[in-house]
């Protein structure tokens, strides 16, 4: 029999009982829609992570102080006094690939401006911070080397802090704020940057010279810092530059061979890989759960096809009596199963894309439907139809024509 004839016969057979056909396809529709929507959520999350990592800066290398342990207490990375401003100078001098560097000392406190107050992160940093983070100013200027050397009480506000202390759209340059009874002059406001790679609001911060945060807010008289943020010259040289930085810091800290580092170094790629790996695992888990629905839909197709073989036994016998071969009958029922699964799969793809769009629109969650996921879903639906439709089709092909014609 011609393929088009078999396809037309299959469509007519499925159209005889539209309700049953629709309900049979429903399992496949739900399975494919679930698969598409779960993959869309996972892909959207991965793309957002990559965008946020890129927005954090170019070719970032993060160095953090080591872990402090004492009296049974462990403060975690950044708690020990293992990094100093001299380490920054050493890296600057000995690692040519480290283009921009900024020491960092962070704290959190309540900030007061007039009758308004706001609790925020106060990030002590250096003059090259805007170049590292590719972060422009909305108002005013950034602090200078003179401010850093003199530990000047100047501050550059994030947009969230500025809006809450002085009102939206207000230029607060020249105004004064109080942090721990210390009066700071506002010299600038950064442009809005949005959330960071760990979900924190990057605009909810105040930037000040790291020396100021050390001496005026944390009461430290030494040169210890919490970390160093570095922008490498090229993404292709990240591994080599990281190795050079590690060697310089080990020499600075007089660590002998075999002794563990007393600092932690992470690159932008490390952070992105870690976060992407987590989302890929979750996406795979959710897609696996959604795949169970496809298997259930396939079992439903097999069940209905078995019923169809029983109902159409006389029809099968008649076709064999007039010359149809067993392979023709097998192919016809196999085509019916594949049509059920593929059409259901296509409806499922449309429903899955619609669900992904609805999630983005109403819940503001990022989603993205990759083309390979659509092709995979439709292909898997077709494979499911072939797998679960083969047994009923083979059963139909093996029917005895004489017995089939006698069937009531």
Image (cartoon, grey):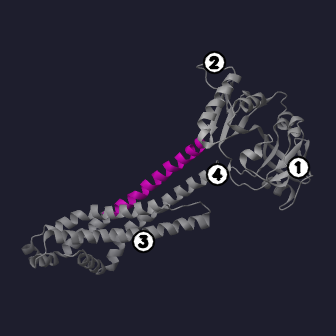
As helix, strand or loop, the secondary structure at mark 3 comes to: helix
Quarter of the image where one finds residue 348: bottom left
The circle drawn on residue 187 is 1
Q: Where is residue 371 in the image (x, y as percent from the top left)?
A: 47, 62
Q: Earlier in the sequence, mark 4 or mark 2?
A: 4
Q: Label 3: how many residues lie within 10 Å, few (<14), some (14-19) or many (20+)? A: some
Q: Name the one closer to the observer, 265 or 337.
A: 265
Residue bearing the label numbered 2: 256
Q: Earlier in the sequence, mark 4 or mark 3?
A: 4
Q: In this view, does 273 lie to the left or right of 144?
A: left
Residue plotted at (88% across, 49% down): 187
282 is within the stretch colored magenta: yes
* Vertical comparison of 379 with 96: above or below: below
Q: In this view, does 27 lie to the left or right of 249?
A: left
What separation in Å lies between label 4 and label 1 (alpha carbons)?
A: 27 Å
What separation in Å lies between label 4 and label 3 (alpha carbons)?
A: 34 Å
Residue bearing the label numbered 3: 347
Q: In this view, does 23 lie to the left or right of 256?
A: left
Q: Where is residue 353 in the image (x, y as percent from the top left)?
A: 50, 67
As helix, strand or loop, the secondary structure at mark 4 comes to: helix
Q: Which of marks 3 and 1 is nearer the N terminus?
A: 1
Quarter of the image where one finds residue 139: bottom right
Residue bearing the label numbered 4: 52
Numbered marks: total: 4
What separation in Å lies between label 3 and label 2 (alpha carbons)?
A: 65 Å
Q: Earlier in the sequence, mark 4 or mark 1?
A: 4
Q: Name the one closer to the observer, 232 or 48.
A: 232
């Amino acid at each position: 029999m011609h393929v088009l004839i078999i396809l037309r016969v299959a469509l007519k057979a499925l159209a005889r009982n539209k309700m049953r056909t629709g309900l049979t396809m429903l399992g496949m529709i739900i399975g494919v829609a679930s698969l598409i929507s779960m993959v869309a959520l996972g892909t959207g999350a991965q793309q957002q992570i990559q965008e946020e990592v890129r927005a954090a800066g170019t070719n970032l290398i993060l160095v953090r102080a080591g872990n402090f342990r004492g009296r049974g207490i462990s403060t975690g990375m950044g708690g020990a006094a293992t990094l100093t401003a001299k380490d920054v100078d050493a890296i600057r001098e000995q690692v040519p690939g480290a283009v921009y560097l900024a020491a960092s000392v962070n704290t959190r406190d309540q900030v007061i401006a007039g009758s308004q107050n706001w609790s925020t992160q106060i990030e002590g940093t250096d003059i090259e911070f805007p170049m590292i983070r590719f972060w422009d100013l909305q108002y005013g200027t950034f602090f200078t080397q003179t401010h850093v050397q003199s530990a000047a009480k100047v501050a550059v506000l994030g947009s969230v802090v500025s809006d809450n202390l002085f009102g939206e759209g207000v230029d607060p340059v020249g105004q004064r704020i109080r942090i721990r009874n210390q009066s700071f002059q506002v010299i600038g406001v950064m442009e809005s940057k949005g959330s960071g790679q760990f979900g924190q609001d990057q605009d909810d911060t105040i930037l000040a010279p790291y020396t100021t945060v050390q001496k005026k807010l944390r009461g430290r008289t030494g040169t210890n810092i919490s970390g160093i943020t570095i922008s490498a010259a090229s993404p292709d040289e990240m591994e080599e530059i990281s190795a050079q930085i590690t060697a310089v810091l080990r020499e600075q800290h007089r660590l002998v061979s075999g002794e563990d580092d007393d600092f932690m170094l992470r690159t932008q790629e490390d952070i992105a890989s870690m976060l992407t790996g987590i989302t890929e695992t979750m996406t795979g888990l959710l897609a696996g759960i959604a795949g169970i629905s496809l298997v259930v839909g396939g079992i439903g197709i097999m069940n209905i096809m078995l019923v169809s073989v029983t109902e159409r036994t006389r029809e099968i016998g008649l076709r064999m009596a007039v010359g149809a071969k067993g392979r023709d009958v097998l192919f016809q029922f196999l085509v019916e199963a594949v049509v059920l699964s593929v059409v259901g799969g296509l409806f499922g793809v449309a429903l899955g894309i619609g669900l992904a769009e609805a999630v983005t629109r109403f819940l503001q969650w990022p989603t993205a439907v990759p083309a390979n996921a659509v092709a995979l879903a439709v292909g898997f639906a077709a494979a499911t139809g072939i797998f679960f439709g083969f047994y009923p089709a083979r059963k139909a092909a093996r029917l005895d024509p004489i017995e089939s014609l006698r069937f009531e």
